[in-house]
Image: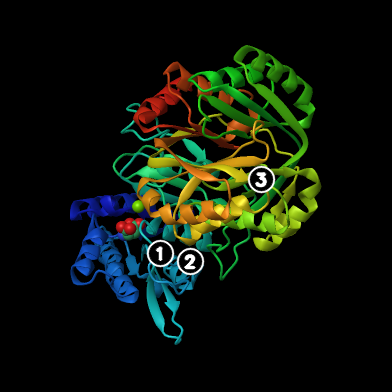
Amino acid sequence: MALLVKKFGGTSVGDITKIKNIASSICQSKEAGNEIVVVVSAMGQTTDDLNCLAEAISKNPNRRELDMLLSTGEQVTIALLSMALNEYGIPAISMTGSQVGIITESIHGKARILDIKTERIHNYINQGFVVVVAGFQGTTLSHTGSMEITTLGRGGSDTSAVALSTALGAETCEIYTDVPGVLTTDPRIVRNAKLLDEISCEEMLELASVGASVLHPRAVEIARNYGIKLYVKSSQSVSSGTLLESQIQPLPLKRGSLELTKTVNSLEVLENQVVFSLSNIPDRPGIAAQIFEKLSEANINVDLIIQATNDGNNNDITFTVSESEVNKTAEQCELITSQLGGEYNLKTNMTKLSIQGAGIMGRPSVSADLFDTLSQANINVRLIATSEIKVSCVIEINNIPKAIRFVAEKFKLSDTQIFVNPIKEKQDKPEVRGIALDKNQVQVSFRKLPDRPGVAASICLALAENNLLFDTIVQSERISSSKTKDISFTMNKQDREKANLVFETLTMKLPGSYIEDGPAIAKVSTVGAGMAFKVGTAGKIFRALADQDINIEMIATSEIRTSCIVLEKDCDKAVNAIHNHFKLEK
Ligand code: ASP
Ligand code: MG
C-alpha cells in the first residue's frame, strides 16, 4: 500500500463540477489500494478576490488579519472536497493547517515551514480516511505564546504538499494543475513546445521564469533537499506528466527546520583553471558562434563564459578551461585572433569558486554578501557570472584556503557542504532541457571601475540595501585597460529609475567610474544538466542566434545554464531559434 500526496491547484478545484471530478479520481486511486492525503488550493481566483476585499478597506492591511482572511479560501475547498468524497462513499476528513500542526515561522504572509506534526493524519489514514489538508497555511506561536494563523506566500500550496510528503514519508507527491506538466519553454512563445517526461530539480530552478509558473520554487527546493519523487500532471487528462528528480543525496529530515532557512547550500571550488580573455574582437552576430565552434572542434570543454557589454564596436569574451587544455586552447585563440583581429591573453593558477542554493533566487543580497566576504578577506575577484541559483567567481589560487574559510563562516557551511575539486559522474542527461525567457529588463554597466577588492561588493550591497533587484551580474577581463574593470548586470525596467540615486552615490565613491545604460533587453537562458559534460553546447546556442542575425549583448554561464542577453525585439525569435536548433519540439 502506497501513501500518496495529491495536490490540486486553484483552477483544478475552480467549481463544483471540477471538485466532484477530482473526488471521483481520488476515489479510484483509493480503491486501487492507496492511502491518500490531499492538499488543495482556494477555488479559482478566490485568493485574488479576498485580496481585493482587503484592499478595498485598507492600502496596508494588518498582516495578521490578512492571513486570517486569505486562509479562508482553502478552508472552503477542503470542506467541499471532503463532502464530495463522502458522497462517493469514501470516508474523508478535512483539516486546516493549524489542525494538522503545520508549524511555521512567525512571519505573516511569507512564512516558511519549520515542522509538520503527523500523528493526527496518520491516525486518520490508519482508520481508512482520505485526509484533505488546506494548502498555503500554517500555524505559529506568537511572541505572547498564543496560536496564530500564517500563510506561506502566493502559490504556497505546492510547498505545503511537498513539505507534507516529506514529513509523512510519502511514496510520491503529485501536483495536479491546468497545464500538462513542465514544458521545454513557454508555449505562448514557441507553439510546439514539448512536454518533458522528466527534469532535475536544479534544472527546474534555473528555468525559473518557465518553471515558477508551474511550480512554487520553494516546493522544488524541498523536493530537491529531501529527494521527494514529485510529479506535475494535468488534472484534465491522464498523461503521466513530468517527474522532477533530485540530483543530490537526500538530507535527513530536520524537525524544526524543514524548509531550511539557509540561503546557500554548498560551496564548490574548482582549482587549476585557466582564464582566457579575447579582447577587441568585432561585435557582430556570429562572432561568439565562430569562436566557440572552433574550440569545440578542437574538443575543448569550456566552463565559464562571460561577455560583458561591448566597448564601441569591439567586444571582449572571457572563458575558462581546465589547466590540462591550456596549450590546445592557446593554439585555437592564436588562430581565432589572426582571423578575427583582436588579441588574447591567458592567466593560469586560477580557481573558480561557486556558491549554490535555491535560496539565492530573487535575493541579490546573497551575491553582495559573497563579494563583501571576499573583499574582507582582501581577495580580488577577477570574473563574476551569476545564474538563478548559483554565483560563480574566479580568484587566484593562492587565495583559496582563506576564501573557503571566510565564505564557509559567512554562510554557516559545514565541511560536508564544501566540495573542493569534486569528481562529477558523467551524466547521460540532455545538453538542453528547456529555455526560459525574462523580459522587461534593461542592461546597466559600471565602466572604468578601480580594480581592487570590494568594488563588486559595494555595488551589489548598495543595490540590495535599497531593495533593487538585479540579476545576471557579469564581470570580465579587459586587456586594454587593465587598471580598471567593468561590471554589468540586468535589472527590471521599473527598478532602473529608482536606482538613479544609488548609482550617483556609487560613482562618486568609485572615482573615474561612470554608468552606461544599455538598450531594452531580454534574457534567454538555455538550461540542461548535460551541458557541463558536453563539448560545444555554447557554440551551438550562439550559432542558433547568429543564423537569425541576432547580436548577443552579454553572456553569463553556470554549469547547467547559458544565458544570452539579446535586444528585447529579438527575444521571441531567439527562443524559437534555440528551441529549433536543439530539436526540442514535439
Ligand atoms: N491560494 C493561494 C494562492 O492563490 C495558494 C495557492 O494556490 O497555491 O496563491
Ligand atoms: Mg499554483
Image x and y of residue 249, in percent: 65, 50
On residue 113, the disc is: 2
Is residue 462 shown above or below 192?
below
Query: Is 19 or 53 nearer to us in this picture?
Result: 53
Say which quarter of the image contains residue 397: top right
Residue tagged 1: 152
Given the image, on which type of amino acid does mark 3 rest? Asp
Distance from Cα at disc 1 to Cα at disc 2: 8 Å
Image x and y of residue 367, in percent: 57, 53
Is residue 1 shown above or below 96?
above
Q: Nearer the viewer, mark 1 or mark 3?
A: 3
Distance from Cα at disc 1 to Cα at disc 3: 43 Å
Whether residues under marks 1 and 3 lie with C-beta atoms below 8 angstroms apart, the answer is: no
Distance from Cα at disc 2 to Cα at disc 3: 43 Å
Task: Work out whether mark 1 precedes mark 3 in sequence or the reverse, and give the earlier one.
Answer: 1
Task: Work out whether mark 1 precedes mark 2 in sequence or the reverse, and give the earlier one.
Answer: 2
Q: Residues within 10 Å of mark 2 (few under 14, many from 20)?
A: many
- Ligand 1 near label 1 (Cβ, under 8 Å)? yes
On residue 510, the disc is: none
Q: Residues within 10 Å of mark 1 (few under 14, many from 20)?
A: many
Residue tagged 3: 451
Whether residues under marks 1 and 2 lie with C-beta atoms below 8 angstroms apart, the answer is: yes
Residue 249 can be seen, yes or no? yes
